[in-house]
Every structure is written in structure tokens, then in C-alpha cells.
Amino acid sequence: MKKALIRTAQAIFTIAILIYLFNSPEKRAQMGAAFGRADAHWMLIGLPVAFVGEIANIIRWHILLRVQGMRIGWLRLSQLFFVGLFFNLFMPGYTGGDFARLYYSMREFPDRKKEAVLTIVMDRLIGMLALVLTAVVTTAFRWQWLQQTPQASFFVWVLICMLIGFSAMVGGSFLISGLNLASRLPRHFPFREQVIEASEAYHLFAKARKSLAWAFVLSFPVLFSFYGAFYCASQAVHAKVSLLDTVTIMPIVTTIISLPITPGGLGFRESLFEILMSDLAKVPGEVGILISLLGFSFFLLFGLIGGICYLFYSPRGKGGTGVRPRWRQMQGEVERAHSHDDNAENAENTEKAVNERAQASENAWRGAS
């Protein structure tokens, strides 16, 4: 019931913000005119720029999987990654694809579900750490520029609060991990699950420092490829936005839309571009929205490719049934994998035992026949 209410609220907010952004006929006409003047050459440049980041992302994930002995071919790994991009399109926040990647990782490696969870956790932590460092550097370097209007200043402070929260959680989880206190956290401790998973991920990857260093280095091509795609979109519509301006604005947008408010950041991202591009780079609001839409179109294309992969992708091994699961089945298995609740673990063990007994009975019946 609670999840249904949250999804309903997210849907209502998404529809409301889209109506707000595109309700004005004048704004739509101005966006149409700007789109009609767009330079297709910059969009063609933006496509490989965006794709470089996805390649770096795949390599980073491959490194983390190999650390845990989870070996998978490049083609299947790429398919699985693009399936995640497909789910990113309609799941709230900008990490929705992690859900699909985790589910199919567990299908590929059914005996290593916990390692699959912690590999995704470490992938996310490394990516967020690179984003934090980038955001700190660009915000400190261009602090005065970011304070031009009260609206822009407000979003900068939202960014700072989110970065502080993330840093506190990572730092706290690292301390808790070092003191072996993760399992002793009270059940109602804030972000208990995330802290425990981060702590377990540190232990799991503790001896793979060189691999983690390479994974961290690859996070910067991932980020700057993403920023570069939106810069190419801005140049396509002849917006006078420098690369430095884009790199300064993008960490704010990327961090804030990671909140699970709208599917894939839809509408939320466009409203941030409208405000920040207008207030900071003096770009008309409707052009700012168009930059967001054109920049996102690269990743929409990758997501659609992921949708095609989803139609033909079937995990191998014991976990691969060859049948695409229902949404609730995927959700249930991922939640059980994330859960540190003893009752959930006992329920899963009980279900496994029942299935084993049923299989044994069936084999016995067949033998008797």
C-alpha cells in the first residue's frame, strides 16, 4: 500500500511538472523554432561522446565483477548493462537501472547473490565519490558565478546538503566497518541497510585496491562523457554556453535528479536546466529545456537499444529460466537480496527447503513409476 502511494505521488508530480513546463503555447513555439535551427552536426558529435561514457561504465563494472570471480563475456555483460539503461528510463531516480542489473546479475550467478548486490553497491559508491569530488571542485572554483540569483544559490545549497549527507554516510559506514559494528546497528537506525551494505562492500573489496583504483579512474570518463553530451546539445541549439559552464552546472543537476522523484528524472531535469541555464548562463528558459531534452535523447536511444536487448536476453546457468519474469517477481527477489532482516532470510531459506523437498518428492515419485 505504501509503495503504491509513493508511485502515485511520483506519477502525479511528473505529470504536474510536465504540464507546467509545456503548457505555454508561446514556449512550445519558441522551442519548436529553436529545434528547427538546431545543428545536426553537433548532435552527431554528441552521440559518440555519450557512448564513450557507457563503454567506460561497462569496463568499470567488468572490473568489479572479476574481483569477485564473477566472469561473464563482454557481449552478455554489455547486453545486461543496456538492459539496465532501459529500466533507467521509467524507474524513479537516476539509479533505477541498478535494480535491473542486480536482478540479472543474480540470475547469471545464482550462488553469489550477495556478491552481486555488493558489486552493484561498490559500483555506485565509486561513481558517487567521483561525482562528489567533481562537484566540490567546480562549486568551489565558481562559487561567485553560482551565486548570481537566489534560485541558483538555493540549488547549490541543496547540492551541498546532499554531498554532506552522502559523505557522512560513506564516512560513517567506513568507520562502522573498521570497528565491526555493522551487525550491531539498531533495526531503526537511519539508512541502516545502506550502511550495512557499504560496510560489507568494503570488506569484500578490501584486497583489490589496484582494481578499485582503475574503477575509480574510469568514473571520470563516465561523468565527463555525460556532461559532454549535454554540452554538444547546447551547441546544437546555438546556446552560448561554455564547456566550463556546462561542467559547473551538470554536477548540480546530476546529483539532484538522483533523488527518486520522477522516472528517469523526467521533467525534474528539464526544470533544473530551465532555471540554471537561464540564471547562470543567460540562456532563454525554453532553450534550456530543449538542451535537456536533446542531451537526454542520446541516453534515450541507448535505453531503447537496451529494450531490444531485454527482449532477447536470457540469463545462463541455474538462474536462467529463459522466461522473462514479472515485475513483482523481480522486485521481490531484489528486495530479499538487499534485506538484512532475519525474518526475510528465514523465509527465503524456508522457501528453498520447501522447493527442495518438493523436488525430492517428485524424483521419488518418478522413480517409483
Image (cartoon, rainbow, N blue to C red):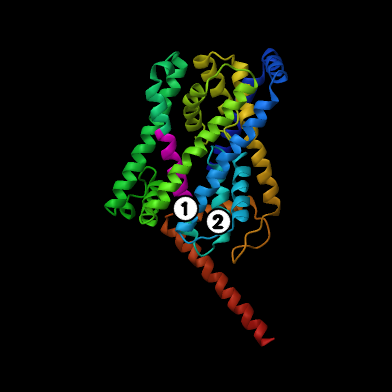
Q: Which mark is residue 105?
A: 2
Please tell me whether residue 120 belongs to the stretch shown in magenta.
yes
Vertical placement of residue 219 versus 250, above or below? below
Mark 2 residue type: Ser
The crowd level at tag 1 (other Cα within 10 Å; few <14, some 14-19, many 20+) is many
In the image, which residues are magenta? 117-133
Residue where numbered disc 1 is placed? 119
What residue do we see at 44% from left, 49% from top?
122
Residue 89: x percent and y percent?
62, 39
Q: Nearer the viewer, residue 217 or 17?
A: 217
The crowd level at tag 2 (other Cα within 10 Å; few <14, some 14-19, many 20+) is many
Tags 2 and 1 touching, CB below 8 Å: yes
Residue 334: x percent and y percent?
53, 53
Viewport quadrant of the N terminus = top right
Residue 84: x percent and y percent?
59, 46
Viewport quadrant of the C terminus = bottom right
Please tell me whether residue 209 belongs to the stretch shown in magenta.
no
Mark 1 residue type: Thr
